[in-house]
Amino acid sequence: MAIETKIRFGAFLIFSITILILAPPNPVSSSYSEYEGKINNYLQQGNNALAAGDLPTAVRNYEACLTLDPNQIYCNINFASALVDLNQSDEDDSMKQKRVETAISLLRNVLSSHPKDGDAAFNLALLLQDSSRSEDITREAANLYQTAVEAIDKDEGEEDRWDALANMAAAKQELGEFLGPYGARRSYERAIVLLEGMVGEYNTYMDQMLNEADSAKREYDDEGFHETQMQINSINAYLSKLYYGYGTILSELPQSDCLSLMAEESLLMDTKKGTDESSAKMVCESNAVNALRLAVDLDGNNVVAMHMLAAMTGGENDGGEGRASNEFVSALFDDFADTFDEKLGALGYKVPQLVGEAAYDMLKMSNMDTFHSALDAGCGTGLAGRFLRPLLDGPLVGVDLSKKMLELAAGCTITKGCGLKDSDASEREGSEEDERSRTPLYDSLMSLDLETATIDELVSGDSIDGFDLIVAADVLVYFGDIQRLLMNFSELSNGNDEKTSFLIFSCERVDDEIAPPAGWKLQSSGRYAHSKSYVIGVAEQAGYDLVSYEEIVPRMEKGEEVQGHLFAFVTGGSAPEDDYEEVVQTIMEEL
């Protein structure tokens, strides 16, 4: 019997397909017919084969069972599990997709006649979330997880399922459903308590093994001891992610919700001190910090928890780097990749378009008809590249730390993906645009650190010595100190006495009047904000002159406008700065 476990919280999932193997009922009366005997015989043979790992035999028996009785609940559920297991060793994507669709259909069939069946609900939720991360699917999955948990709660003989609780918590958190008996906060608490109980039992077993090793009661088992320790380490890694999810919920709750939380039962918090909105918020924040500290203590590799702990404690835990670690950015966006475009679209995300418009303005003020080369620094899924490509007659290079984001960007062509809807592309199919639909949007994509990437790494084999244009759309929010970054951008540009090169990027904004002495701050969101004077000063040290500046709203967050600003700089060329400003003013008037 195969059980696979995979984690995703917020953007993570604890993936665990349960296999329900039920022995057929014994014939206890004359009403037990030969027909029912055949059904249960197929079920038993399927279960035996499934337990032995003989998946083809299991599938044949479950199919025979369902031929006799399409609504046999256990044949449906176990058949779905067998199909999922078959996919683990198959590389044929089309066949794997067909099996998933069949498994989903089988589980829906069970729930149509048994809508409160917890096992079918849990497995269906897992399959749905694994096939899509859309909000509608997440909402359906959250309801299904709740069905599974409610079924356990109603059956006093049924043990609690930490994986069902954790998955429900993750889905509800993504939907913003934090409070209530089946809200994300309470579900995380229940899952944490269950896992900590498991760790306690393992520790007790190990203590007994050590304490009784020299007695006649037990012989010390070195292999068993280390296997148990590995189990504890694995559970602690899950606990780390649970505490991270729990801590981020508490940190995000507004004062009014924190006060409402004080009236709910809590398994992990002392809510007595939260007597009004202000004190309730303090309780939430202190417990959030403690939860994130526990997440880091339980798993030193949980880089997302490390970064968010630093953000919540004013940067005191960021290691003095002045930037988010490569590991944090990679982990964050690898997990966010599948729903990146959809979720940012829902937040009114504008930066790629604003960067593209600024690049067009810079092109008009230069002496070029098109840029000959461009670097999309922190390209993500290619949203900015869609606006840059029409301005280029040479290579468009994309760099990002997230390999999953790069995989999505690599699937974009001149007429498909990277911000274009499928309907936009389908309208052109079969026309003269066929060749364009096969031409990649980016000439090359690679995973590199922007502070250290070299021109040889970026344009190996190409006859260019630098980029006419470098853009960074919403990238500097993961850098505090931007000096090394801008110095390297200067190295990667081709600006000289005769040629100009442009740099365009966005930042989140902290006003000069309230900015820390460093000129930047790590916000509770985990992103950095920079003051205008700091950015301009660092850019000038790197050899750039400011061409244009605009205060922008890059997106909405929790119903409020995020404060940002957009910079355009130039390096090289002989035109005086006043000329640039005059040209830009003319362009803006024309627009």
Image (cartoon, grey):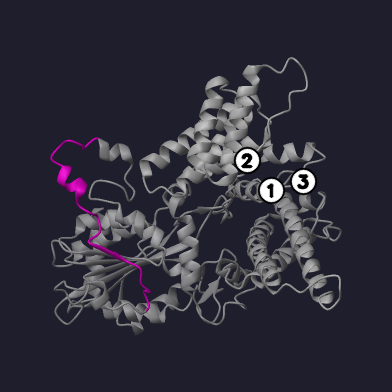
Residue range in magenta is 427-451
Residue at horizontal 46 percent and vertical 63 percent from the top? 564
Gap between marks 1 and 3 measured at Cα:
12 Å
Q: Which residue is mark 2?
A: 122
Pick whichever, 479 or 37, lies toward us.
37
Pick whichever, 376 or 116, lies toward us.
116
Q: At numbered mark 2, what does the secondary structure look like: helix, strand or loop?
A: helix
Do labels 2 and 1 touch, CB within 8 Å? no
Q: At numbered mark 1, what does the secondary structure look like: helix, strand or loop?
A: helix
- Answer with mark 1 or mark 3, whichever residue precedes in sequence: 3
- Magenta-span inclusion, residue 411: no
In the rendered image, residue 438, in percent from the top left (x then y), is placed at 20, 48
Helix, strand or loop: magenta stretch = loop
Query: Image height check: is 566 above or below 516?
Result: above
Q: Which residue is mark 1?
A: 165
In the rendered image, residue 100, in percent from the top left (x then y), is placed at 47, 38
